[in-house]
Image (tube, coloured by chain):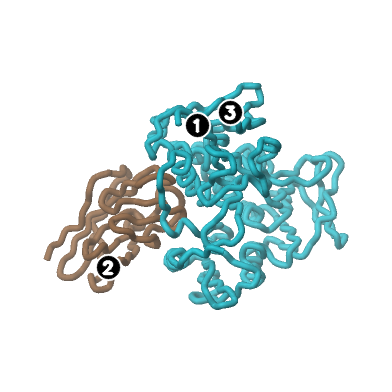
């Protein structure tokens, strides 16, 4: 598990980048935390720098949008989904369970509140 | 509408096809492309592709889902005329494609120098251009780039990264003066120095030296820069000659309204060839930006199909980026010659900052950032959120 930080350090609408085997972007969407691979699958850009709109993040370079729950791109220019990672909150601390493996899984990975 | 012809098989053309299908159009679509290649992405041509870190396959724009677009592709064929009365596109082999709607997405072509072409002199616009340039950009060769615009600067940056001795010649006092202004252009000049690329600003081009093959570039002050390879990065012209006399209004490209509609009903123009009315701008603008090529076709497709579509507000602002010397430059908005610029965040000497341009009344009109994507995104949205000018 990778420690992301205290819940209070990641306000709603904000995102942080942490380093696992690859860089991971963690988002706070109105109190729900989501984690995806930080690097856009289209071209080199950091999704944690992107614009959050509901449960989607828009890549800061080309405006490719990814659904934070599934990792799926909502349309061109991105073609491949990003990996999602499980997020858990324990005692006010946010952790990421990195999805290991190169295969991108397109399944929902919703933040789980463990309080 | 039963048949649409899209002239141009690049990013804007493919996006137009996708947009037509996304918006429910189920009639025939024919796409005419001058290049033999299926649609590909151009930005990497001056960077990763030239450096050899991505392959031709990586540039492909089509996805497996695009198989369902059901378009009829005519690649390697050139449109030579448009008969607006019948909305018929005439191809170089005489074929006439009759349709109800036409999307003009013919793009632009790289400008060349007048006179005899010498071996070793290149432009970079198409994949074939990049393949040719990649062959000759080998370590030990000496490269002179004419023009320190985005393409020229990116090629110089890539070449420097490959260990190629590089000179850049720029007629203006700083690189990128027109898009970014003097002050920020001066900063970009320093980017070249970080990789020991010699930038010659305020330097007029007197001519190329060589009988069959280029050997040097001669400047108006008499200096000669030895060269094995010369790349001309001196801009692009819209590919609209084939439309002269067609009745489609031309003025620095195809003149359109804000939705991409030309003076001929059911003929729209998108991407680099379209000189369109824009939100926030008093004058029509022809934008050679990647982002424009993925946004404008969606609006134009809706106009062609008679549907309502309101694009997100931040699509109304011109936006471009450039990757040079390990840094990412991003710009959005409308900078005018009388705009002033102020650095609001970061450190210009470290090439990590955000600067905002304001008009004489003090209103922010554009934003520039180097390696500050997050703040840039916020400013871009904020700028787009202001009311559109209607003058």
Percent x, y of residue A45: 44, 56
Label 3: which secondary element: loop
B372 or B299: which is nearer to us? B299
Q: Chain of mark 2?
A: A
Q: Residues within 10 Å of mark 2 (few under 14, many from 20)?
A: some
Q: Are marks 2 and 3 in contact (CB under 8 Å)?
A: no
| Figure label count | 3
Q: Are marks 3 and 1 in contact (CB under 8 Å)?
A: no
Which chain is cyan in the picture?
B
**Position above or below: B33 against B179:** above
Query: What's the mark number on residue A70?
Result: none
Q: Colour of chain A?
A: brown
Question: Is there any visible trace of residue B268 in the rendered image?
Answer: yes
Work out how far the residue at label 3 is from the one at label 1, CA to CA, in angstroms.
12 Å
Residue in the foreground of this view, choosing between B178 and B247? B247
Measured from the top left, where is residue B10 in percent x and y? 54, 39
For residue B305, side relative to residue A8 (left or right): right
In the picture of the structure, the residue carrying the numbered disc 3 is: B86
Mark 3 vs mark 1: tell me if same chain. yes
Mark 3 Cα shell of 10 Å, populated few (<14), some (14-19), many (≥20): few
- Can you identify the residue that label 1 sits on? B4
Q: Is residue B134 visible?
A: no
Label whose residue precedes the other's in the sequence (3 or 1): 1
For marks 3 and 1, give the one nearer the viewer: 3
Instruction: Where is residue B112? Give x, y as percent.
Output: 75, 45
Report which residue position mark 2 lands on. A12
Q: Do marks 2 and 3 share a chain?
A: no
What is the distance, in whole Å, between disc 2 and disc 1 at their CAs? Answer: 46 Å
Tell me the quarter of the picture where residue B52 sits: top right
Which residue is situated farthest in the top direction here?
B94
| Residue for point 28% across, 51% down | A84
């Amino acid at each position: 598990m990778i420690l992301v930080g205290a819940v209070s350090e990641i306000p709603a609408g904000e995102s942080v980048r942490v380093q696992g085997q690859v860089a991971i972007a963690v988002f706070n969407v109105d109190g729900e935390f989501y984690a995806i691979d930080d690097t856009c699958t289209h071209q080199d850009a950091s999704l944690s720098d992107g614009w959050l709109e509901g449960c989607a993040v828009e890549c800061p370079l080309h405006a490719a949008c990814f659904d934070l729950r599934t990792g799926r791109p909502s349309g061109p220019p991105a073609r491949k989904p990003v990996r999602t990672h499980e997020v858990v909150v324990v005692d006010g601390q946010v952790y990421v369970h990195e999805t290991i493996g190169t295969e991108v899984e397109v399944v929902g990975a919703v933040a789980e509140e463990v309080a | 509408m039963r048949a649409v012809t899209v002239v141009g098989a690049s990013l804007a053309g493919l996006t137009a096809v996708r947009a037509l299908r996304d918006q429910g159009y189920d009639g025939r679509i024919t796409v005419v492309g001058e290049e033999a290649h299926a649609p590909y992405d151009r930005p990497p041509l001056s960077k990763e592709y030239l450096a050899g870190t991505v392959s031709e396959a990586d540039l492909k724009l089509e996805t497996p889902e695009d198989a369902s677009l059901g378009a009829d592709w005519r690649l390697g064929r050139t449109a030579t005329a448009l008969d607006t009365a019948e909305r018929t596109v005439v191809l170089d082999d005489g074929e006439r494609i009759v349709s109800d709607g036409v999307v003009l997405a013919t793009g632009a072509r790289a400008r060349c120098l007048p006179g005899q072409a010498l071996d070793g002199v290149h432009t970079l616009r198409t994949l074939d251009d990049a393949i040719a340039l990649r062959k000759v950009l080998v370590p030990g060769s000496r490269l002179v780039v004419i023009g320190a615009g985005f393409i020229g600067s990116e090629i110089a940056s890539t070449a420097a990264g490959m260990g190629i001795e590089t000179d850049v010649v720029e007629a203006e006092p700083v690189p990128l003066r027109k898009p970014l202004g003097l002050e920020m252009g001066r900063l970009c000049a320093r980017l070249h120095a970080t990789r020991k690329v010699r930038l010659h600003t305020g330097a007029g081009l007197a001519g190329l030296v060589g009988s069959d093959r280029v050997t040097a570039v001669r400047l108006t002050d008499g200096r000669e820069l030895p060269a094995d390879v010369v790349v001309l990065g001196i801009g692009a012209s819209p590919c609209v000659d084939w439309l002269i006399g067609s009745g489609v209004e031309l003025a620095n490209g195809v003149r359109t309204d804000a939705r991409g509609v030309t003076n001929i009903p059911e003929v729209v123009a998108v991407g680099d060839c379209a000189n369109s009315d824009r939100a926030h701008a008093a004058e029509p603008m022809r934008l050679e930006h990647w982002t424009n090529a993925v946004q404008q076709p969606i609006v134009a497709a809706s106009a062609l199909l008679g549907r309502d579509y309101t694009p997100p507000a931040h699509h109304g602002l011109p936006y471009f980026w450039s990757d040079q010397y390990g840094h990412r430059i991003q710009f959005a908005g409308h900078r005018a010659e009388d705009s002033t610029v102020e650095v609001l965040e970061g450190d210009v000497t470290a090439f990590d900052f955000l600067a905002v341009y304001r008009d004489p009344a003090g209103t922010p009109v554009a934003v520039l950032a180097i390696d500050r994507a997050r703040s840039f995104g916020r400013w871009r949205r904020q700028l787009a959120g202001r009311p559109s000018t209607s003058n």
